[in-house]
Amino acid sequence: MDRFDAMNAFARVVETGSFTKAAETLRMSKTTVTQLVQQLEARLRVRLLNRTTRKVNVTADGAAYYERVIRLLADMDDAETSLSSASEAPRGRLRVDVPSPLARMVLVPALPAFHARYPDIQLDMGVSDRIVDLIGENVDCVVRGGELADQSLMARRVGDLQLGVYAAPAYLERAGTPTHPRELEDSHHRIVGFLWARTGRALPYAMRRGEESVNVHGRYILAVDDGNAYLAAGLAGMGVMWLPDYMSKAHVAQGDLIPIFEDWQLDPMPMFVAFPPNRHVSAKLRAFIDWIVELMGSYAPIRAQ
């Protein structure tokens, strides 16, 4: 039995709550993971997990052992990455999940520079706006806009997205240009709805001008849960939409979108990199987070609190 593999397999079973999911994330067979944990229990002469047909629960001894194991695995990773060669050149596979517009417009175009700086980091990038089970899906980190719903996650603020309100010329020609946000509640105006993953519904937008403030719900005939589809719907004239500067700038310059309510302010949307609390921040993860911070400094710098 390889003790490192056995401890790693045990930790993954605890984190995912399933031998099957642990095997998938470790790219091993379920039989191999089961055997490794059984061999570990035999060596320690203690039951670490209680197994039923439906789920796996960690025992009291297993929970205590798990806390020691994750620290030991982190120390082993530190020992490797502390070597000068490893510190200078982080390496390994990194699984991340990022919003689709950010990937298409910002991150992917900048990846050649990231690869040139860190040629030994292999990125597996999920592109979505969905809620990601970081532990169950073995994802190292996610990049998300808005306040984090899961307060158990560790997070680093990497940017503040400045928002504006926009519409396509075709929409404004058809519906007229609104001069006050409350006009978006009128029967002849429409917004493009965005369905937030954590609620599954469209949320109101808070806007203010001087002492006046409004929460805009609006009416929609289309609501989507993907940023690229949201932008495409607005460009097609489906309604008014709220966009961060990095998504709107090029389209405004080309005349595809027209800003409205420019004398109104919206609070910036914070952007975070989040990762599991029990996940060791490896050299490759630190390198990716630092790169995101550097990159977003050009697109959405963090505003002073």
Image (spheres, helix red, strand yellow):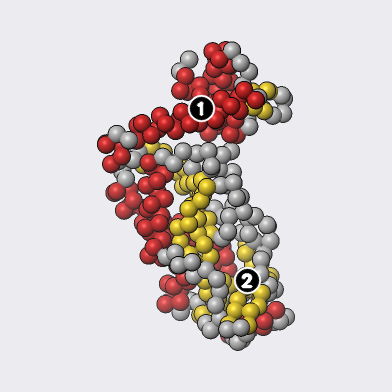
Picture quadrant where residue 213 is located:
bottom right
The residue under label 1 is 69
Q: Which residue is nearer to you in this view: 209 or 27?
A: 209
- Label 1 secondary element: helix
- Label 2 secondary element: strand
Give residue 296's position: percent from left, percent from top: 41, 61
Is label 2 or label 1 in front?
Answer: 1
User: Which residue sits at x=68%, y=61%?
Assistant: 201
25 sits to left or right of 189 = left
Residues at marks 2 and 1, CA–CA distance in whole angstroms: 45 Å
Label 1 near label 2: C-beta < 8 Å?
A: no
Q: Earlier in the sequence, mark 2 or mark 1?
A: 1
User: Taking 135 as reference, is 296 above or below it?
Assistant: below
User: Taking 71 as reference, is 120 above or below it?
Assistant: below
Picture quadrant where residue 212 is located:
bottom right
Identify which amino acid the numbered label 1 is placed on: Val
The residue under label 2 is 205
Give residue 127's position: percent from left, percent from top: 51, 52
Q: Residues within 10 Å of mark 1 (few under 14, many from 20)?
A: some
Q: Which residue is nearer to you in this view: 200 or 161?
A: 161
Labels in figure, total? 2
Give residue 158's position: percent from left, percent from top: 45, 58
Identify which amino acid the numbered label 2 is placed on: Tyr
Report whether residue 189 is seen: no
Picture quadrant where residue 200 is located:
bottom right
Report whether residue 89 is seen: yes
137 sits to left or right of 203 = left
User: Which residue sits at x=32%, y=35%?
Assistant: 82
Numbered circle sitting on residue 134: none
Q: Which residue is nearer to you in this view: 45 or 269?
A: 45
